[in-house]
Image (cartoon, rainbow, N blue to C red):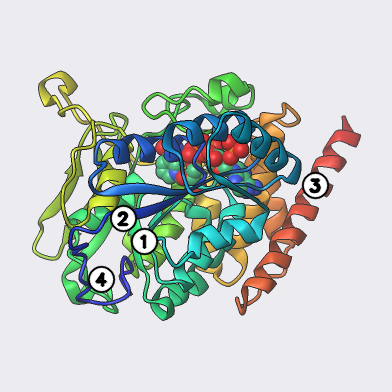
Amino acid sequence: MVSVSSGDNVDFNTQGKIQQVTILGATGTIGTQTLDVMSQHPERFEVFALTANANVQGLFDLCVKYKPRYAVLLSASAATSLETQLKNAGVVTTVLQGESALCEVASHQDVDVVMAAIVGAAGLHPAMAAAKAGKRILLANKETLVMAGNLFMQAVTDGGATLLPIDSEHNAIFQVMPYQRSRVLADIGVKRILLTASGGPFRNASMEQLQHVTRAQALNHPNWVMGPKITIDSASMMNKGLEVIEAHWLFNASSAQIEVLVHPQSVIHSMVEYNDGSVLAQMGNPDMRTPIAYGLGYPDRLISGVSSLDLLKVGRLDFCAPDQNKFPCLRLAYEALDAGGTAPAILNASNEIAVEAFLADKIGFMDIPALIETVLSKANVEAVTSIAQLVEVDADARRAATHWLNTLACAH
Ligand SMILES: NC(=O)c1ccc[n+]([C@@H]2O[C@H](COP(=O)([O-])OP(=O)(O)OC[C@H]3O[C@@H](n4cnc5c(N)ncnc54)[C@H](OP(=O)(O)O)[C@@H]3O)[C@@H](O)[C@H]2O)c1
C-alpha cells in the first residue's frame, strides 16, 4: 500500500484551474514556507483559508498580506480579537473558530489542496477531514500517520484523496521510488529504505553531556529551521523514530526494511536501495521549500526559491549508524511500531507531554525517553478500531505522562 494517492493512475493535471489552498498551521515554519512558494506562482495558487492555534498577530499579518476567504483560530477569544482587528484594517476575511472550523476549511467543496502543517496530535481531525473529502493533501503533520496510520490511509482511499508526503525524507523517497499502490516493497524490487538523519545538535555529545544539555542547546539545530516541537524531536532523534513509523504507513514497509542512517550534512534527504544494487538518492540543500514545491506542483517541478546545491562547497558527505543507547527515543519508536495497535499513539502522546515539559524547563533532556518508556511499559496496547478510541488512548497517555511528571516533581 504505497500511499501517496488514492489510485494508480490519478490525473494530476489541474487543467489550468487556479488551485484553492487551505494551509492548516499557516503561522508555523511549514505554513509560512508554503505561502512563500505559492507567492512565486500566483497563476497557479490562491489562498483559500489560513489557520493557527492562538497566534492573533501572526494570522492577522498573513490575512492582510494574502487576503484568504477564511481565517480560523482554535481559540475563541483569539478569533474574536482577530475578527475585530481585520475589520478595523478593512480586510474582508471571514473568521471562524474551533476544531470543527479547522475541519470545515480542510474539507470545503471549493478547496483543492490542503497543506496539513499543524504540529502534533491536534492535526489529526483536520487531516482526516481533508482525506474523507478527497483533497490533495500535502502531509507535513507526521503525527497523524503515527497515531492513526491505518485509519488515515483508509480514509485517503475511501475519500479518493491524493496524499503527498512533505517531510523531506518521505518526499525524497517518493521522488526516487516510482509510485505503486497496493504492492509490497519486494514486489517492486525494493530492498530497503535508507532514512537519513542529521543527528541533530547532540550527535557528538557523550551520554554524560546529554544529561545536562539545555533547552537553548537543544533548540539550536545545525541544519534546519523548524518549529520548537520538531526541533526537540530532532535533538532526541524521536523525530526520526516518528518518521520510521510514517514511512511504514506511506510506503508499506516493515520496520526491518527501514534503516536510519546519520548523515550530518543533510544533503541526501533519503535513499532507496533496489534488488539490483542500485541506490537512488534525492539531494538538495536543506530547505523545506523543495518538498513543499514538489507537493504543490506534482507532477510539475516548480521554482521554489531554493538555491542550487553546491557540492564543491559541501565537499564531503559523511554517514554513520545512529547510537540507540544515546538516543533511546529511536529505539522506542521502532518498538512501538513493532508492537503495533495503539502503541505508536501512546508513544506520540507521551512524547508531546515530555517535549512540552522539557521546553518549560521542568525536566532534563534524558527524562524525555525515560518518561515515554515508563508510559509505554505500563500501557495496555490494543488494536486500533476508531478515531474516537485513539482520542481516548491519546488522553490516557497524556494523563499517565503528567502523573509521571508530578511524581518526579514531588521527588525533587
Ligand atoms: N518545520 C519543518 O521543517 C518540518 C519538516 C518536516 C515536517 N514538519 C512537521 O510539520 C508540522 C508543523 O511543523 P512546524 O515546524 O511548522 O511547526 P510550528 O512552526 O510550531 O507551527 C505549528 C503550527 O500549528 C499551529 N498549531 C499549534 N497547535 C495547534 C492546535 N492545537 N490547533 C491548531 N493549530 C495549532 C500553530 O499555530 P500558532 O502559531 O497559533 O501556535 C502553527 O501555525 C509538524 O508536524 C512537524 O513535525 C515540519
Dot 2, how many residues are within 10 Å of its Cα: few (below 14), some (14-19), or many (20+)? some
Determine which residue is flagged by label 3: 402
Amino acid identity at mark 4: Leu
Real-space Cα distance between discs 1 and 2?
6 Å
Residue 58 lies in what quarter of the image?
top right
| Secondary structure under the numbered disc 2 in the rendered image | strand
Determine which residue is flagged by label 2.
19
Is there a contact, CB below 8 Å, between mark 1 and mark 2? yes
In this view, which residue lies farthest toward the right?
Answer: 410
| Location of residue 258 in the rendering, given as x and y in whole percent from the top left corner | 34, 58
4 vs 2, front mark: 2
Separation of residues labelled 3 and 4 (CA atoms): 40 Å
Residue 304 versus residue 192: which sits nearer the camera? 304
Q: Earlier in the sequence, mark 4 or mark 2?
A: 2
Q: Give the residue drawn at x 41%, y 63%.
A: 110
Indicate the amino acid at tag 2.
Answer: Gln
Find the distance from the CA under tag 2 to the CA under tag 3. 43 Å
The residue to which callout 1 is attached is: 112
Quarter assignment of residue 73:
top right
